[in-house]
Image (tube, rainbow, N blue to C red):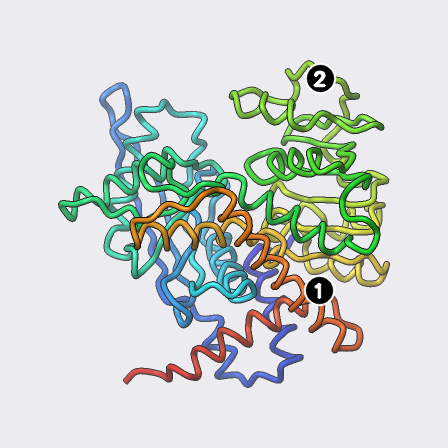
Amino acid sequence: MASALDSALTQFHAAADRLALGDSQRDLLTAFKTVFQTEFPVEMDDGGFRVFQGYRVLHNGARGPTKGGIRYSPDVSLDEVKALAMWMTWKCAVVGIPFGGAKGGVVVDPKSISAAELQNLTRRFTAEITPIIGPDQDIPAPDMGTNAQIMAWMMDTYSMGRGYTIPSVVTGKPIAVGGSEGRYEATGRGILYVLDEHLRDSGGVRGKSVAVHGFGNVGGVAARLLHQAGARVQYICDKDTGIYHPEGVDASSAFAFIEAGHVLADWDGVGQRIAPSEVLEAPVDVLVPASMEHVVTEANAERVRAPLIIEGANGPLTPEADEIMRRRNIPVIPDVLANAGGVTVSYFEWVQARQYLHWREEQVNEELRRLMVAAYHAVWSRCLGESGCSMREAAQWIGVERVLEATTLRGIFP
């Protein structure tokens, strides 16, 4: 199977073909500004040391400081981090916020180490990447396997090196140390806003049947918000267990259970236990793949039965699967639009931290809806103006054009 980076580059070059970009422009936009790789020791609870591998990749800073999450996962690789950084560049451009794309990660299963070891790892990794991060340079955020507490440790470590508190160096922090209202739910809420707008002519999400593949900070929040908005979330799953209920799973209760540190296999709510793979093939109105990259591939794309897909995760469809959906006339609302709510509210958090202000959650959500709906209409309008266009292509065109415009206006120094 092709890597996530292969998918990102395939999507870029397809957009570049339609935009008639030359070789030098393609080289410029696929180059990575900074690729930082480190192997660093961490003191463990038994007094010994263990060496971990970490990455931070800055893709393109033409539109502003780079922005992107830090993930802790045993599957982290340099190619994956590069792909996610590139997708983040286009994502920020599509929603119109003044950031470029970045991503980072550490090869570790965070559940396999203690809380003290997790803090030691986070602080040491932060110290390693301190030369390339900063509130005007590169701003990390949570991602798979990381959370608000880890961002607080990162912010504190960076600040101690400067001698004063710098809350704007990361986003996704706890509210008590400069985080934003609404940040935790932002990615899931952005999915709700985009999907509701896409379905507006048929009554929005209310009454629609939904399958959500993945039940973490993206899928779990999206399922809960869709449930609260009146959708019938019939299928949910984590990595090991799927649950189906024809009248709709109580996604709010299920996610509260997950947030308390449990797994769906132990949840005692109503629903039939099924394999997670069945969620992707569910006969529902909307499929939300929100777990990880490449869960819908050439091997299973023909078995997808939902007439609409909205991508919660980054890169959940391979290019081959994307082509199959196009042939089957199944629209895909792409990740660079659909899951941009997280980075959008991260931008709001950064602005608040720079100004030492605190917005009410209603203000955050109102601004999030405004930007997400505007981005959706920009993509939809662009798609209507091009024959045979998919929403992914339209979003890619917009993102690439805006980054190229900023690069051209700035010129190349010296």
Q: Is residue 196 above or below residue 273?
A: below
Q: Residue at x 86, y 58 (%)?
A: 328
Please indicate whether residue 314 sits to the left or right of residue 174 in the image: right
Q: Is residue 302 visible?
A: yes
Front in this rendered view, residue 150 or 38: 150
- Name the mark on residue 391: 1
> Residue 21: horizontal and vertical position, in percent?
57, 83
> Residue 269: horizontal and vertical position, in percent?
71, 17
Front in this rendered view, residue 63 or 7: 63
Please indicate whether residue 4 sits to the left or right of residue 57 in the image: right
> Which quadrant of the structure image shows residue 393?
bottom right
Q: Secondary structure at mark 1?
A: helix
Q: Which residue is mark 2?
A: 269
Amino acid of disc 1: Met
Amino acid of disc 2: Gly
Q: Secondary structure at mark 2?
A: loop
Q: Along the polypeptide, which appears first: circle 2 or circle 1?
A: 2
Which residue ends up furthest to the left in the rendered image? 163
